[in-house]
Image (tube, rainbow, N blue to C red):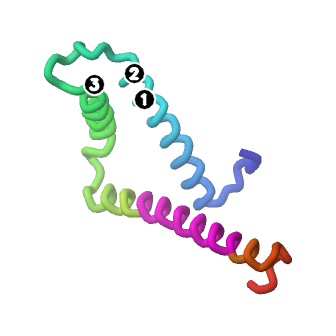
Amino acid sequence: MGISDTGDHVDEFVFELLRTGVMLSDLTSDLIELMPADAYPGEQPGEVVLEMVCGTIRSVLASVDPAEVRRATELIDEAGSRVIEHLELAYRLSKRIQADGGRGRMYG
């Protein structure tokens, strides 16, 4: 990624969030694709894999205060929402700059 261990708690959160998110996304996608359709008759492979992942993660979080888990979930949601918000703002700013004839940012 180009940024090494900065020691900053926010950077550490972001990197761990990205690493874990990509790993879990790749893993669940691969397992769903590899699972034979008839492995669990009457059930969807995707639902089975997600239940397995939830069960595994539950084994770590079961002993954690539910309020902490809820707060962590809120932080993850807020972080994702802020990224989308800033990308939308950057997109709108880019469109305004282009509409001005590409003269560059004359403000902000």
For the residue marked with disc 3, what is the amino acid? Pro
Say the numbered circle drawn on residue 33: 2
Element type at marker 1?
A: helix
Residue at the spot 30% in from the left edge and 13% down from the top edge: 36
Of the pair 93 and 7, the residue shown nearer to us = 93
Say few, some or many: other residues with alpha carbon within 10 Å of mark 1 (under 14 / 14 to 19 / 20 or more): some
User: Image point 39% across, 21% down: which residue?
Assistant: 33
Q: Looking at the figure, which quarter contains the C terminus?
A: bottom right
Disc 2 marks a residue whose amino acid type is Glu
Whether residue 34 is situated above or below residue 91 in the rendered picture: above
Dominant secondary structure of the residues highlighted in magenta in the image: helix
Q: Image quadrant for the N terminus?
A: top right
Q: Which mark is residue 29?
A: 1
Confirm or deny contact between disc 3 and disc 2 (CB under 8 A): no
Q: From mark 1 to mark 3, how far is it between C-alphas? A: 10 Å
- The alpha-carbon separation of the residues under discs 1 and 2 comes to 6 Å
1 and 2 marks in contact (CB < 8 Å):
yes
Q: Which residues are magenta?
A: 75-95
Indicate the position of residue 37 as horizontal and vertical percent values: 27, 16
Whether 83 is among the magenta residues is yes
Identify the residue under disc 3. Answer: 45
- The x, y position of residue 106, in whole percent, is 81, 84
* Image position, residue 85 (x, y; %): 53, 68
- The answer to which of marks 1 and 3 sits earlier in the sequence is 1
Classed neighbour count for the residue bearing mark 3: other residues with Cα under 10 Å, few (<14), some (14–19), many (≥20): many
- As drawn, the residue found furthest toward the left would be 42
Question: Where 2 falls versus 97 (above or below)?
Answer: above
- Image location of residue 13, percent across then percent down: 55, 55
Q: Secondary structure at mark 2?
A: helix
| Earlier-in-chain disc, 3 versus 2 | 2
